[in-house]
Image (cartoon, rainbow, N blue to C red):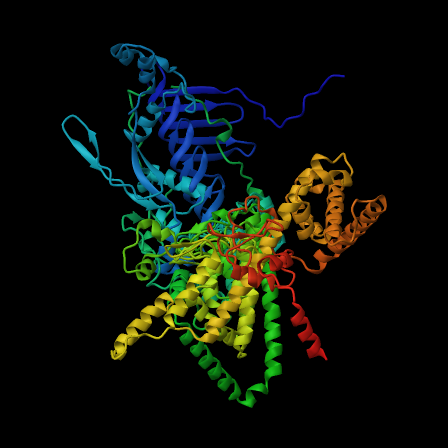
């Protein structure tokens, strides 16, 4: 079956005749001034003007005659570049329309005015046959916040505008053909003569490397092409000298702001600048076209009215009108007013998601910038933040712009505006009113005899298809425009008429300097703070008690009004959030938002966790740093805000989205100088506080009890997501600061898995345990009582404080604080915590002894000075009660350390037995007994129940050996046998019946243990893993301590001859240890050895009997 080609809509190509009358070059190509005529059965065209290499190039006039079945006539007068309409020109259409403006490769491109026969004009920037930017804006305040309406706003926007620098490109400065010949070994003189032969004589394709483009550029621009290039900073003034025979001229680089940050508008600006010399010969004012006012031109025509209607219908939500204007009337979906606000911007400000989606599907740019460098998504996010703070339209500008004193500096005076006026007060002079010329009065350019190639007729790009009968009646368009305009003005007036309930209007982007708050927290006297809080609470209570009862009369009505307002507010917020979600779904990029602030900055200010998640999901950088606010990130900004439940949800959302909390804040210059009298090095500026320091330094009123819980949750979140609590700032870490403030906050750090409880926490090289037994801190425990009183409003007694302190010590040891490690206090080093604590006690007892020097009188000032110095170093007199508390706390830690020692010994014995059982696992457990050496020690120190606990800890190491159930059963049977033999429950040798009994008992104990471990985790979920000395691999040096006082052992020590596992430093320690119940299984042995009881004599026995009688 034959394959039929698809049907096409190609028109028939009629043959045509061409006649030329004019100048030619030496190659007989059309070059210079001439007239060309084309004739065919379908058309008769002609051209009169400048020619170059058989192409229309330069200034000329092209006429279309008898085009189409209607025999229409169209004329273009203006500039050509290589057979294309390019540059300034005027097109006259058969229906009486005349377009005057810039062209780019046969299409309208840039500023222009289309005049109608009915004395109407369509004015603006043109993109083909559609208006891209109008010279009009509504006669009401802008629905998109007009940031550039005051000088401060202009300064804010100037930081985000694209800069354009002028430059001149010298034509033919680099000869590519000559360089190629030299590169391949040609003689320079020969290359200078032959390089022209590399270019074909009739090549006119300027995109081809074989085309000599420099010839076309030189004929069009003379010797230089004025260009605008995008730059990031203001370039230095370049003095480029253009040498001639005897003189040189200097040119200076100028820098301009781009009209708009959109790429199309930037290209149009470059195109206008390149053809500025042609534009200056016209009577049009580019300033009026770009800036307005619109009354400088004739009334708007159909294209402009429909474009205006599209903008207003997009805001009002008339989807049918929007669809008709785009689909039927061919209005550009990206059309903007003279402030750069596009149709999507209007729809976003009106919360019309359906229209936004339609415009995006029609081809509109969802990320189009307005002149204030704002995108539709950025304006919508900004409206959401302002609505949450109850700030209406008429106060929005004041809320988002900084005060003039703290605002950004004005832009450099060297940066200028090019043919556009940003001053809202500006009005154009009446003399600038446009008058449309009928023809260009400029004379044709003289012929260039030295010009060099081919020319073709304009073919299908000759004219635009015009159907006069299908033109809509402008009266109908005017009626639609008038109705939309009236509705739009009423709606915007209502939005701006809402009164602002917030007075004064705050600057919502004000960020607290957390370094100053932390500095104040370090310098505050806690007693004064507590007194101030108490006075403040009393004054508030007095005010509340004096509140007149008549204020309660209309309470119910006010509550109902508040509820109604809150419902309306939540509905509006829901609509704005739906608009934001749709913009993001349709491709809006949050990374393009920079003015007035980045998106996550605004979301943090708005306290919206949902908005944060949406922005991060669609590409926003959650760890972006903002130089304008102390180089904070979005997380830093959220932490710096006042404590609230909403702010806590934002911090949680940022952390869940990947925000990094483990970084240090940068210290501003003002704060860094006040922290210390010495000059800080540059690297110290970056070593600022952490976010934990900032949260701990927040001041909370004692009446706002719920804020204490919020602060605790914030600390827990930061610790959970990796903020390092050990990082030091100003001599102290966050853990150190929490210990000084409140033990409840300190407990959060203790229970966090991120806290290394054995790390150094301050500039005194102290660990947490060392500071707990540091005398100045111990004297600060009554301060903790005052802080707890301020928090809870209840005067706790010292007994409660002691119990809480003991509870904290127990938690520390339970969660991994190791008192047996080496420690420091300043430059002094100690074998472990107990050596440090004993030295503290010796110092206190020595200071309490009365002085032997008598008769020397001291002044009060001298006594006070010595007292202050002693207080600084912790050497003041301590009461007997406080000294007893200190000893009691130390005794508690000694008991816990002894327990750690016992657990380590038990695990050591069990590991040895596990290795032996694994080595002889093919044997029965009763056959392995003879291979084990430490039978007596194992029987004394281990039981089956304790061994199961050790096994659970060892299983956490995930070694294969510690997950073998067979080995576990054999080990437990051996331990159970040793236990019974040591206590003489079982006889030796082991019988078969005894072995069966041991096996059954071990199986029962394992089953009971499994049942217990199944239920325990659900009932008591652990916050962090408990301390596990059983996993200590190398603990010989650390556990080389006295079993009683836990002081490091020296050369002289007393070893237990029974188990040979523990040592004592003296007989006093053995005495105290023997008196402890269930502490050491060898207690009776030690007692008989070192303190034997003498056998009673006969006289002593008779005396006892006599006393009983």
The total number of labels drawn is: 0
Picture quarter with the C terminus: bottom right
- Viewer-nearest residue: 510 or 457: 510
Q: Picture coordinates of residue 877 (x, y %)? A: 39, 73
Q: Picture coordinates of residue 865 (x, y %)? A: 28, 73
- Viewer-nearest residue: 328 or 211: 211
Picture quarter with the N terminus: top right
Image position of 956 (left or right of 550): right
Can residue 920 be seen? Answer: yes
When the figure is inspected, residue 583 is found, relative to residue 500, above or below; the finding is above
Image position of 504 (left or right of 1107): left
Q: Picture coordinates of residue 442 (x, y %)? A: 31, 36
- Viewer-nearest residue: 726 or 605: 726
Can residue 352 be seen? Answer: no
| Residue at position x 46%, y 80% in the image | 534
When the figure is inspected, residue 38 is found, relative to residue 692, above or below; the finding is above
Q: Picture coordinates of residue 770 (x, y %)? A: 46, 60
| Residue at position x 62%, y 82% in the image | 556
Image position of 916 (left or right of 353): right
When the figure is inspected, residue 157 is found, relative to residue 871, above or below; the finding is above
Question: Which quadrant of the structure image shows residue 20?
Answer: top left
Kindly give the residue lying farthest to the right in the view shown.
993
Kindly give the residue lying farthest to the front in the view shown.
1099
Image position of 82 (left or right of 555): left
- Viewer-nearest residue: 747 or 350: 747
């Amino acid at each position: 079956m034959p394959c039929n080609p698809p049907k096409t809509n190609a028109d028939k190509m009629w043959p045509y005749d061409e006649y030329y009358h004019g100048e030619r070059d030496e190659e007989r190509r059309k070059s210079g001034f001439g007239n060309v005529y084309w004739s065919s059965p379908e058309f008769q065209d002609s051209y009169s003007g400048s020619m170059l290499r058989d192409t229309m190039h330069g200034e000329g006039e092209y006429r279309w005659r008898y085009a189409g079945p209607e025999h229409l006539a169209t004329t273009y007068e203006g500039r050509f570049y290589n057979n294309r309409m390019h540059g300034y020109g005027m097109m006259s259409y058969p229906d009486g329309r005349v377009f005057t403006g810039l062209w780019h490769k046969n299409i309208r491109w840039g500023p222009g005015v289309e005049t109608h026969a009915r004395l109407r004009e369509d004015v603006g920037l043109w993109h083909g046959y559609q208006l891209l930017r109008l010279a009009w804006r509504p006669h009401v305040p802008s629905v998109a916040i007009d940031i550039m309406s005051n000088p401060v706003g202009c300064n804010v926007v100037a930081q985000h505008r694209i800069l354009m620098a002028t430059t001149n490109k010298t034509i033919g400065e680099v000869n590519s053909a000559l360089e190629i010949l030299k590169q391949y070994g040609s003689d320079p003189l020969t290359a200078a003569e032959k390089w022209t032969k590399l270019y074909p004589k009739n090549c006119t394709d300027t995109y081809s490397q074989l085309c000599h483009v420099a010839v076309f550029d030189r004929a069009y621009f003379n010797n230089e092409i004025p260009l605008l290039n995008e730059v990031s900073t203001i370039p230095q003034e370049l003095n480029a000298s253009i040498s001639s025979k005897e003189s040189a001229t200097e040119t200076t680089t100028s820098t301009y702001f781009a009209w708009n940050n959109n790429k199309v508008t930037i290209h149009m600006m470059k195109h206008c600048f390149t053809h500025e010399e042609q534009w200056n010969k016209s009577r049009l004012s580019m300033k009026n076209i770009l800036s307005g006012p619109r009354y400088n031109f004739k009334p708007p025509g159909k294209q402009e009215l429909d474009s205006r209607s599209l903008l207003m219908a997009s805001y009002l939500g008339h989807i049918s009108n929007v669809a008709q204007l785009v689909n039927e009337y061919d209005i550009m979906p990206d059309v903007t007013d003279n402030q750069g606000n596009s149709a999507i911007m209007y729809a976003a400000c009106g919360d019309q998601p359906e229209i936004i989606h339609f415009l995006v599907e029609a081809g509109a740019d969802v990320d189009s910038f307005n002149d204030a460098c704002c995108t539709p998504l950025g304006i919508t996010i900004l409206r959401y933040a302002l609505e949450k703070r109850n700030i209406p339209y008429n106060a929005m500008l004041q809320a988002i712009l900084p005060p003039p004193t703290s605002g950004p500096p004005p832009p450099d005076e060297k940066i200028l505006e090019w043919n556009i006026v940003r001053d809202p007060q500006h009005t154009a002079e009446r003399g600038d009113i446009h008058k449309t010329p009928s023809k260009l009065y400029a004379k044709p350019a003289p012929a260039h005899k030295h010009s060099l190639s081919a020319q073709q007729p304009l073919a299908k790009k000759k004219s635009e298809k015009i159907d006069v009968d299908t033109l809509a009646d402008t009266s109908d368009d005017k009626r639609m425009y008038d109705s939309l305009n009236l509705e739009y003005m009423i709606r915007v007036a209502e939005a701006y008429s809402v009164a602002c309930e917030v007075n004064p209007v705050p600057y919502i982007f004000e960020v607290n300097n957390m370094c100053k708050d932390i500095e104040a927290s370090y310098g505050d006297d806690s007693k004064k703070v507590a007194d101030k809080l108490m006075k403040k609470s009393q004054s508030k209570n007095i005010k509340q008690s004096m509140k007149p009862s008549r204020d309660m009369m209309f309470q119910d009505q006010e509550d109902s009004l508040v509820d109604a307002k809150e419902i309306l507010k939540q509905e509006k917020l829901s609509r704005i959030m739906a608009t934001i979600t749709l913009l993001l779904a349709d491709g809006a990029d949050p990374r393009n938002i920079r003015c007035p602030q980045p998106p996550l900055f605004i979301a943090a200010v708005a306290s919206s966790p949902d908005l944060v998640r949406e922005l991060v999901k669609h590409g926003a950088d959650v760890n972006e740093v903002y130089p304008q606010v102390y180089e904070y990130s979005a997380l830093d900004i959220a932490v710096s805000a006042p404590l609230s439940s909403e702010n806590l949800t934002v911090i949680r959302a940022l952390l869940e989205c990947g925000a990094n909390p483990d970084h240090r804040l940068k210290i501003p210059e003002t704060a860094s100088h006040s922290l210390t009298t010495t000059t800080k090095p540059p690297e110290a500026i970056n070593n600022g506080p952490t976010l934990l320091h900032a949260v701990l330094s927040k001041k909370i009123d004692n009446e706002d009890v719920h804020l204490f819980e919020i602060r605790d949750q914030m600390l827990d979140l930061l610790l959970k997501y990796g903020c390092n609590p050990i990082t030091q700032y100003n001599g102290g870490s966050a853990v150190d600061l929490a210990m000084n403030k409140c033990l409840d906050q300190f407990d959060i750090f203790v229970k966090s898995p991120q806290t290394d409880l054995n790390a150094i926490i301050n500039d005194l090289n102290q660990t947490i345990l060392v500071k707990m037994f540091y005398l100045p801190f111990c004297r600060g425990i009554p301060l903790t009582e005052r802080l707890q009183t301020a928090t809870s409003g209840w005067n706790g007694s010292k007994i409660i404080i002691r119990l809480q302190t003991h509870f904290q010590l127990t938690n520390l040891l339970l969660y991994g604080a190791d008192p047996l490690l080496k420690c420091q206090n300043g430059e002094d080093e100690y074998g472990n915590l107990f050596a440090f604590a004993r030295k503290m006690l010796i110092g206190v007892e020595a200071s309490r002894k009365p002085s032997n020097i008598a008769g020397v009188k001291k002044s009060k000032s001298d006594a006070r000075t010595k007292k202050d110095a002693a207080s600084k170093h912790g050497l003041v007199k301590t009461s007997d009660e406080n000294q007893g508390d200190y000893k009691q706390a130390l005794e508690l830690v000694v008991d816990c350390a002894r327990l750690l020692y016992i657990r380590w010994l038990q695990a050591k014995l069990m590991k040895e037995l596990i290795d032996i059982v694994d080595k002889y696992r093919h044997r029965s457990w009763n056959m392995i007994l003879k291979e084990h050496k430490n039978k007596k020690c194992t029987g004394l120190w281990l039981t089956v129940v304790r061994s199961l606990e050790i096994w659970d800890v060892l299983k956490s190491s995930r070694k294969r050996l510690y997950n073998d159930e067979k080995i576990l059963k054999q080990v437990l049977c051996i331990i159970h046998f040793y236990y019974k033999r040591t206590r003489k429950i079982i006889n030796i040798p082991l019988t078969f019946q005894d072995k069966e009994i041991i096996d059954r008992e071990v199986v029962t104990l394992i089953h009971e243990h499994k049942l217990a471990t199944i239920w325990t985790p659900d009932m008591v979920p652990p916050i962090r893993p408990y301390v596990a000395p059983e996993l200590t691999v190398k603990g010989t040096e650390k556990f080389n301590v006295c079993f009683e006082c836990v002081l490091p052992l020296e050369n002289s020590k007393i070893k237990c001859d029974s188990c040979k596992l523990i040592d004592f430093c003296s007989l006093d320690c053995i005495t105290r240890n023997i008196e402890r119940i269930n502490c050491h299984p060898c207690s009776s042995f030690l007692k008989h050895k070192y303190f034997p009881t003498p056998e009673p004599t006969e006289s002593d026995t008779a005396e006892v009997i006599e006393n009983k009688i």
